[in-house]
Amino acid sequence: MPFLLRVELPDVPGSLGRVASAIGEAGGDIEAIEIVEKRHDEGTAVDDVLLETAPGAMPDSIVSACEALDGVRVVWISRYAAGGNLFLDLEAVEEMTGNPATALDRLIDLLPITFRADWAARVSKETGVVHATEAAPTDLSFTSIGRAARVDTDDDNVHCAARLNKHEIVMIGRRGGPEFLDSELARLGHLVALAMSISRAG
């Protein structure tokens, strides 16, 4: 069964190798790794690890094995149903460029995969939700926003948003976390700006 593990570890040579060994000894087989963020001021890195578990292996065992390592903290682990590959930002741009007329809707379709989130939506100031993935809440409302930022919620879900234009924003959400990192907010802002440029080119 595929799982996605987000792990914080010391940004020093050998750290990722030790984490990989711990995952393997606990019954996990690593399919892909993506560096999400490097925190130079703290000397740490945040990585996403896509892994398959061996029959009988429990995700709790993988978490325990990782956290037994000095300086390693598992931020979150969840089942990952999007298939066997991490979907990178450039692949999302390539998908949108294929049909500029639908680039904005295609962006929404791709954001949950690109950011390992549960849903995404385009929200209009005038009409509310314009386009959304299946799991998106139906009562989302427009928020005036400049650069991409986290959005406060009344529950344990986490949302962030970026301005698409004067009348629309893009929102993405995760149920129960983890929080969107600053690097993810920067990526979201960049992708939204690219989507707007691509759509105008069409």
Image: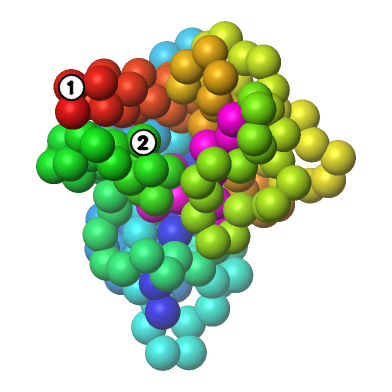
Question: Does the residue at mark 2 contact the one at mark 1 (Cβ under 8 Å)?
Answer: no
Left or right for 45, reference 94: right
Rendered residue at 68%/52% (across/down): 137
SS for dot 2? helix
- Which residue is under mark 2? 104
Distance of mark 2 from mark 1, alpha carbons? 12 Å
Above or below 136: residue 55: below
Which is nearer the eye, 89 or 202?
202
Rendered residue at 86%/40% (across/down): 154
Rendered residue at 55%/54% (across/down): 118
Q: Which residues are magenta?
A: 111-124
Q: Is residue 167 visible?
A: yes
* Crowd rating for badge 1 (residues with CA inside 10 Å; few <14, some 14–19, many 20+): few
Residue type for callout 2:
Leu
Report x, y in % for residue 55: 41, 90
Left or right for 46, reference 202: right
Report x, y in % for residue 63: 55, 61
- Which residue is under mark 1? 201
Report x, y in % for residue 54: 37, 83
* Crowd rating for badge 2 (residues with CA inside 10 Å; few <14, some 14–19, many 20+): many
